[in-house]
Amino acid sequence: MLISVCFLVFGGAGAFAPPSSFVLHPAKTATTTSLRDAEDLVEQLDAADCTVAKSSIASLNKDDDEVMENGTAKRVQQNPLGKFADFCSATTFSLLHFNDDLEIKDSSKNLRVLWSRAYLDHVGAMKDDIAYTLLPTSTRDAIKLLPKSGPLVNFQEFITSRTNFIDSTVDKFLDGVVDSHGSGVKPQIVLFGAGYDTRSLRYNRKADFFEVDLPDVVDGKGRLQEYWKNNQNNSEEIDLPTRIGYNLNDAMDEDKPNLSYVLKDAGLNPDVPTLFVWEAVLFYVKPEAVMELFSDIFNLGDNSVYCLVDSLKPAVTTSFLHEVRSFMDDYQLEVIDHNSRWGGAVHFVAASRKDSDLTAALSKKSEELPFSYLATSVEEGIQSQKFDSASFNDHWYAVAYPWQVKEGEVFATRLWGEPLVLYRDSDGNLVCSKDVCPHRSAPLSMGKINDEGQLECMYHGWGFGKDGNIESIPTQIRDGGSSKRSPPKRSCLKTYCVEEHEGLIWIWRGELLEADASKLPKTRDVSTYPIDTVLDYNVDWQYIVENNLDSPHLFWLHNGSVPPVRSLNFVREKVNQVKLQYFRDDSGHGHYGQTAGGKPKIVRFDSPNIVRHGGTSSFSEEFHIVPIAPGRTRVLLRQNLPKGPILTTALSIPGADFVLEKLVNLWNYHIALEDYSVMQGQAHNVDDLGANHLSVGDLGDDLIKHFYKWKEHAVANDGALPFFSKWDSSFKFGGAQQMNDVVQESSYSVVDDQSTVNGENVGTYGILKSYTQQTPIVSYPPNNYKMYKPLLDLDQAFRKDAPGNEEKEENGPGLVFGVGFAAACGGAGVATARAAEALDINLLDLPHNLIAFIN
């Protein structure tokens, strides 16, 4: 029996994660730019003397490689693995229901989902105490033999997440009806593709339920619900739902009644607040029928709410909120909540009729969704990009990852050239201070965290604790341990407001008491797995901003050099196929476009120093471009990988997270090294020889032009350059009026010794602690490329697709790169290298292949 139930879980994978078992083909639609954005783009193209034709702002073409069937976009196509899984699970169900007198059929895998819900409730992954009681009494205890954690639970994450989303929407809807209509109104809930869902029983008598599904499913579920009700002690208190047998594909049949008519004929009252729910059913419905259903149901009732955990194709073919919002606007619906999975194959959407009292009540229970093309938004971000309000001040700057500022250690860095230290006090709270002791101005970065959790100055032992307050001065402590006198307030550290937020450490560049936490970026709830990479550049921050705003260079400069770039068709022969549209949302300015392969891509500038990229399946990148000093930049790159059942399961394997993160880091080092040398040459021509940043514009240069104009206005508005000059007598930040005032190595009268110990530059060597002016120490590529270069040399020498190696056929890349990677990563890398050798694959391809499989 245990083997049979295991077949149930693995064999029913298609029911658990439809996008993994089916290939979904979008229908063709057109996306147009709003008049405001089009006018703005034309103006910017003209101003930049761009040679690109203005037709580049035309509508985007959708994927031409569409599979058609009978003149219609083919809805689902099951792969061989899915067919084999169905065969295994069908065999399992014949055993689990062999003595079921109710003769329940497993139509569209509905029963498999019921068993999964019972199992997930049993292990505590979700709440559904009814599901178990609906299973056959003779076999239902089989779920208790399964493990309570691990891959079997992780792989069914789609069922858990969709159930939680719908239940949460139902709860908010019921509360919203009470708030807007009073407790005397009993609402209605309609479940499309209800299958063997238990929601009408779990929310019994809280609403009038209508369940719509195929006639044979409705017939079987009716028998099951009646049987269940008759076996309850309080059966007279249980109201069963109104069941409606209806094939949703009939919505496009002119000879059959509309679904809204069928619902009203069954007793639905359009004047009563109603929640309509679609749960993983539209995958099986033809595109024409889907559009007819939307047109019919989205116009039904003035107090209607809609919840979909489903495909929105062909109406919406990408994963982005702004496209969902545009589609819902056509039906006068306001999007209240949204996220998506698998490149837009599944959307989690809650929407309600605009300007209704019920919508107002629901909006109070949910955070307002900003107008943002990306999942991350910045409150009033677009206001800070207006030229008259541009500034480098009163902004949050990410300066480190939390894992870089460890308890018991001092972390030294700089921002705009000003030396800073970060540490955690005895309670683990972050403190950020200027890197100078208020006593005799020794660098605090040479200090340590003592046994009391204080930052202890190396020179005289002064100890600083919570909020940078002075807590210990050794010369002022009596023999009994008490202080001779309270130290003056000026003995405390000069601190900045610091926040740990969404996996980054942020510093407020502005007055301490004016720090505004509402201006920190906020990311909507999307299921992703973050991977962090640190990059060090010996080039000014502005060149890295413009590089990451520039989409066309991906095709020419990088030319498919690593798997993610190659998979998106970023190759030179495709450069003329890229399409870009200029946009403006509530957070900033950007480009919305398509790659040569038809995949959507978003680039946005969040002033003053962040560039964000977005792609399909909730994938995103955020480049926090930290200006360390003039000509010196550190980039905190976070890449958010879509986290579905497969990635969740894969990451449960010991060492898998380490291997994946190291491989993605290596990708980023490779790309950075390709960019770095070009950027440094560009910076020399501009900064030293007087060349222009942009002379003749091309596709995409409008966004770069906007950035430099914003930067120019920010300097003018601030009345100074953003870089540090010198502290005044009270250690207040002194801004540089011109580049000659900027504190930099060439202007130092005291320069550290540049001593080298074991091949590393330690500054001025010291027995107790060395001193370096170049904080943070350059530890990462592309500037310090030593950690990556040996692996690159090995990989390039044996890869058949490496420059100059096109004729080589011997020595596949897996072994060579795998051995180098194993040396860098240890045991997990050894196992991966051996697997790569056996399969003759390039380890650089592994993360891409995994992500492609997930999507």
Image: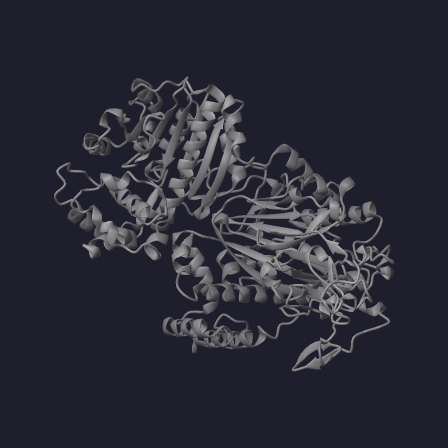
Image height of 339 relative to 330, above or below: below
Q: Position of residue 840 (x, y in %)?
A: 39, 72
Image height of 120 relative to 789, above or below: above
Q: Position of residue 814 (x, y in %)?
A: 43, 73
Image height of 279 relative to 606, above or below: above
Quadrant of the image containing the N terminus: bottom left
Q: How many marks?
A: 0
Q: Is residue 821 left or right of residue 78?
A: right
Q: Position of residue 686 (x, y in %)?
A: 78, 60
Image height of 824 relative to 691, above or below: below
Q: Which of the 4 image quarters holds residue 230?
A: top left
Say whether residue 524 is visible. Answer: yes
**Of the pair 508 and 236, the residue shown nearer to us:** 236
Q: What residue is drawn where x is 49% and y is 23%? A: 179
Q: What residue is drawn where x is 71% and y is 43%? A: 385
Q: What is the residue that sits farthest to the front in this orientation?
A: 480
Q: Which of the 4 image quarters holds residue 135?
A: top left
**Of the pair 652 and 302, the residue shown nearer to us:** 652
Q: Is residue 194 left or right of residue 551?
A: left
